[in-house]
């Protein structure tokens, strides 16, 4: 167990008004968690301090060689007034999967969860209460050695910052348009596609700009080898309801193992629905749409939870999904997961964790 030292701010910020639009990722709370790693000493000096800028060498390896990872989860104000997390143990496990790939020292899973709970508890008054809002939690680790050489760093900084946030997409649950990218690729097996690291997101920006310029919200990536198998959306995993079955691309090393993805799969199985994790080609998708078997498409992720897709574009083919409105299954999944997160509905799979 970590011995976390807490230094509270003497100049607390004004909190957003209850009816103030929060946006996503623009507002930050009063405190942050920090912990250092030194080779030979391990992780040490766990502390919660006032939120503020960092002093770091311009030669820090994170700036030059990209050795860093991050996570994303949320805290919620339950209808009973208590603060809750959603499956934080899964974020802890994924943190270490990313760390292994990036040669970052592993972090004990129980320490990760303890750190998240501790900083959320200090800033629990920042958790917004309006429906659809939450306290976004951003843990991350950066390499801090001041060294211009390609090698794993010997020192690291683990931090957690918090941001009260509203809907990730301004459109909320309104179906979004997705651009199926046929030029750029995001990742390939053997690379870093399964790791939650900034380089994967930087690699997506050029295609994202292209999609936005054409009026689409997100990019749907194809595999990097054959350029024909569906992988994931820029900030989400992707699901299709085809002829009554729930289909999602199988994890293959180039797809991020999303925690909401795993939750959706388990929920659907819990409800007795047939779920297939397999390869699905863009040609199969187009054929399903043209034959009337493509019933729903939706993305899943921590930020948006569920994002229904109303339009898919692939080259010259523009497909309208479910008449451009949210599907029955998408709505049910969203209502169930958010109901669990906010304590409105039963938690049959034991995913809700109280912050004490």
Image (tube, rainbow, N blue to C red):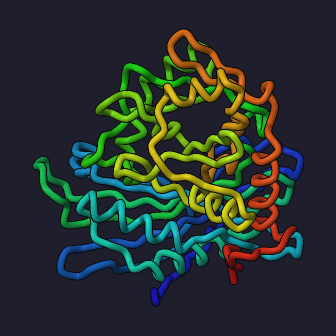
Quarter occupied by the C terminus: bottom right
Front residue of 179/42: it is 179
Q: Residue furthest left?
A: 149
Q: Left or right of 199: which side holds 295?
A: right
Q: Position of residue 328 (x, y in %)?
A: 82, 44
User: Residue at image x 61%, y 55%?
Assistant: 275
Q: Position of residue 46 (x, y in %)?
A: 43, 78
Total numbered labels placed on residues in the image: 0
Q: Left or right of 245: which side holds 72?
A: left
Q: Left or right of 3: which side holds 338?
A: right
Q: Position of residue 346 (x, y in %)?
A: 82, 74
- Residue 156 vs 190, above or below: the answer is below
Residue 137 in view of the camera? no
User: Residue at image x 58%, y 46%?
Assistant: 247
Residue 234 in view of the camera? yes
Front residue of 142/103: it is 103
């Amino acid at each position: 167990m970590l011995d976390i030292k807490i230094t509270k701010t003497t100049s607390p910020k004004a909190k957003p008004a209850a009816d103030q639009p929060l946006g996503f990722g623009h507002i930050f709370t009063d405190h942050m968690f920090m912990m250092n790693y030194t080779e030979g000493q391990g992780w040490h000096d766990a502390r919660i301090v006032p939120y503020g800028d960092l002093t770091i060498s311009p030669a820090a390896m994170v700036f030059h060689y990209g050795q860093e990872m991050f996570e994303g989860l949320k805290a919620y104000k339950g209808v009973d007034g208590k603060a809750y997390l959603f499956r934080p143990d899964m974020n802890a496990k994924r943190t270490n999967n990313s760390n292994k790939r990036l040669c970052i020292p592993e972090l004990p899973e129980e320490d990760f969860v303890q750190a998240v709970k501790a900083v959320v508890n200090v800033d629990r008054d920042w958790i917004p209460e309006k429906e659809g809002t939450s306290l976004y939690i951003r843990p991350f680790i950066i390499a801090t050695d001041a060294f211009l050489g390609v090698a794993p760093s010997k020192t690291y900084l683990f931090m957690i910052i918090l941001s009260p946030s509203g809907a990730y997409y301004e459109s909320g649950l309104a179906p979004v348009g997705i651009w199926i990218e046929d030029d750029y690729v995001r990742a390939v097996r053997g690379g870093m596609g399964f790791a939650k690291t900034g380089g994967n997101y930087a690699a997506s920006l050029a295609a994202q700009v292209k999609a936005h310029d054409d009026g689409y919200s997100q990019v749907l990536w194809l595999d990097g080898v054959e350029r024909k198998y569906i992988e994931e959306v820029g900030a989400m995993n992707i699901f299709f309801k085809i002829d009554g079955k729930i289909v999602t691309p199988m994890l293959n090393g180039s797809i991020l193992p999303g925690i909401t993805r795993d939750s959706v799969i388990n929920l659907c199985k819990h409800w007795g629905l047939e779920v297939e994790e397999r390869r699905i080609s863009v040609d199969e998708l187009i054929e399903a749409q043209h034959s009337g078997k493509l019933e729903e498409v939706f993305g899943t992720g921590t930020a948006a939870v569920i994002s229904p897709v109303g339009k898919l574009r692939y080259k010259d083919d523009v497909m309208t999904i479910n008449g451009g409105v949210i599907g029955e299954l998408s709505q049910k999944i969203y209502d169930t997961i958010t109901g669990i997160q906010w304590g409105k509905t039963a938690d049959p799979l034991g995913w809700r964790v109280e912050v004490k």
